[in-house]
Image: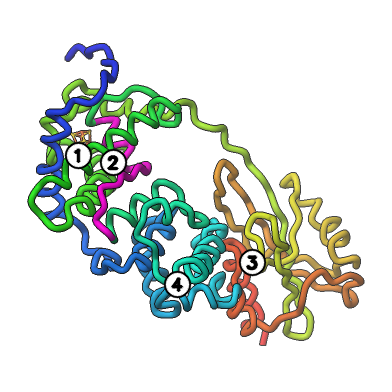
């Protein structure tokens, strides 16, 4: 059995290594980069939208959303002026809806303060709502080829492994070290022959993290920077990055009621200031997961005794550390509900509203059940 060496301390930037990496990364990226739609443009607006959509969301999911968004809202002015219902509908299913509201706010700032033209100065990009150092670096480098760094989960994984950085990337000092390293690499790339080196260097780090240096089963044998990689040499690939203890997962249970009346369904819009604000949903309550609670919950929510509760479907999903089970019932009422927190919509009208991902599944199940009853 090979003996493991003790973890090395990160001792500052190895200048020779920092210089040797960009040519290997750029060469690999030129040959292996995926042909993604946002890589065919230098329009900062289109690149910005892709970067925001890609936060917390996989590439294959984002592609159709990005294409549709650019078709419907082709520029900053169109986004700034779009009705909120439209942007929510275009974002429906992507989750983390604060992102889309910030996108529109930022577009409105660009119209008001930059004449509708996406700013190229890093500080101006960073000052926009919803844009942090990662997105500012991504747009600055990819759209304007500026030597500004990026640091996301993929880049953190690649850099901690390449340089054998054992500290937790969330710790202030380690985080600063990683930003510094990412900055040195993109600056080293700038000095090499080539028109888009800053853009391609940053993208190569993300792409390597996505395709080769994956969280589990990193493909070190085909990695273009294997020879320079500390983690590979010291067999520490699995232990880096050091992400500390995982946050405990919490189970939560919700019961939703699909109330039908004269071919219409009762839905409500989530208020401002809460998670998934302004999105639509069926009336629902949080429960302990005990099925017997459902009748009481329906009575409480609708102010009337349900005549019948029929199981419709159960949707399981996760939001941050919560594992959520949403159980939905079709409700038949003895009489019209005493209190109606919501509006009545036909199945066709439901398709025009933006629902949370879980409730969208309930909406399709409800629409199907209405059609099958006809
Ligand atoms: S050699 Fe392995 S661990 Fe190192 S960067 Fe490449 S894929 Fe990641």
Provide the secondary structure element on which disc 4 rests.
loop
Q: Which is more N-terminal, label 1 or label 3?
A: 1
270 with respect to 163 (left or right): right
Ligand 1 is within 8 Å of the C-beta of the residue at disc 2: yes
Q: Distance from label 1 to label 4 (Cα)?
A: 47 Å
Q: Residue drawn at (18%, 29%), measured in percent from left and top? A: 229
Select label 3 or label 4 by which is in front.
4
Q: Position of residue 338 (x, y in %)?
A: 92, 71
Most distant residue in the left direction:
193
61 with respect to 42 (left or right): right
The residue that mark 3 highlights is 279
Circles 3 and 2: CB atoms closer than 8 Å = no
Provide the secondary structure element on which disc 3 rests.
loop
The residue that mark 4 highlights is 115
Q: How many C-alpha atoms fall within 10 Å of the one at disc 4: few (<14), some, or many (≥20)?
A: few
Q: How many C-alpha atoms fall within 10 Å of the one at disc 1: few (<14), some, or many (≥20)?
A: few
Q: Position of residue 42 (x, y in %)?
A: 27, 66
Q: Distance from label 2 to label 4 (Cα)?
A: 41 Å
Q: Which is more N-terminal, label 4 or label 3?
A: 4
* Residue sitting nearer the eye, 27 or 267: 27
The residue that mark 1 highlights is 219
The residue that mark 2 highlights is 214
Q: Which residues are magenta?
A: 144-161
Q: Position of residue 41 (x, y in %)?
A: 26, 69
Res. 177 in view? yes
Q: Residue drawn at (49%, 74%), measured in percent from left and top? A: 79
* Residue sitting nearer the eye, 101 or 245: 101
């Amino acid at each position: 059995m090979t003996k493991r060496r003790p973890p090395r301390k990160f001792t500052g930037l190895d200048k020779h290594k920092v210089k040797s990496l960009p040519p290997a990364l750029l060469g690999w990226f030129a040959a292996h980069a995926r042909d993604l739609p946002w890589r065919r443009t230098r329009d900062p607006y289109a690149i910005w939208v892709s970067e925001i959509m890609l936060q917390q969301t996989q590439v294959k999911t984002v592609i159709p959303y990005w294409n549709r968004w650019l078709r419907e809202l082709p520029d900053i002015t169109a986004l700034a002026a779009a009705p909120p219902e439209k942007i929510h509908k275009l974002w429906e299913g992507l989750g983390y809806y604060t992102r889309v509201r910030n996108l529109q706010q930022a577009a409105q700032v660009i119209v008001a303060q930059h004449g509708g033209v996406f700013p190229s100065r890093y500080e101006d990009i960073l000052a926009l709502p919803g844009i942090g150092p990662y997105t500012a670096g991504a747009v600055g480098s990819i759209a304007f080829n500026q030597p500004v760094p990026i640091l996301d989960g993929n880049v953190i994984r690649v850099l901690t492994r390449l340089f054998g950085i054992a500290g937790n990337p969330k710790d202030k000092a380690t985080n600063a070290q990683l930003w510094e390293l990412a900055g040195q690499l993109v600056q080293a790339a700038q000095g090499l022959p080539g028109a888009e080196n800053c853009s391609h260097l940053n993208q190569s780090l993300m792409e390597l993290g996505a395709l080769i240096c994956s969280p589990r089963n990193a493909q070190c044998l085909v990695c273009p920077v294997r020879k320079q990689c500390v983690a590979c040499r010291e067999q520490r690939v699995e232990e880096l990055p050091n992400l500390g203890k995982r946050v405990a997962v919490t189970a939560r249970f919700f019961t939703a009621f699909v109330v039908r009346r004269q071919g219409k369904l009762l839905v409500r819009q989530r208020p401002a200031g809460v998670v998934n604000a302004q999105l639509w949903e069926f009336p629902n309550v949080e429960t302990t997961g005990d099925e017997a609670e459902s009748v009481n919950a329906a009575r409480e929510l609708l102010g009337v005794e349900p005549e019948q509760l029929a199981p419709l479907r159960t949707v399981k999903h996760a939001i941050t550390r919560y594992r959520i089970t949403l159980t939905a019932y079709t409700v038949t009422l003895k009489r019209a509900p005493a209190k109606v927190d919501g509006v009545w919509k036909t199945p066709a009208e439901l398709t025009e509203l933006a629902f949370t991902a879980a409730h969208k599944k309930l909406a399709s199940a409800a629409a199907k059940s209405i059609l099958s009853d006809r």
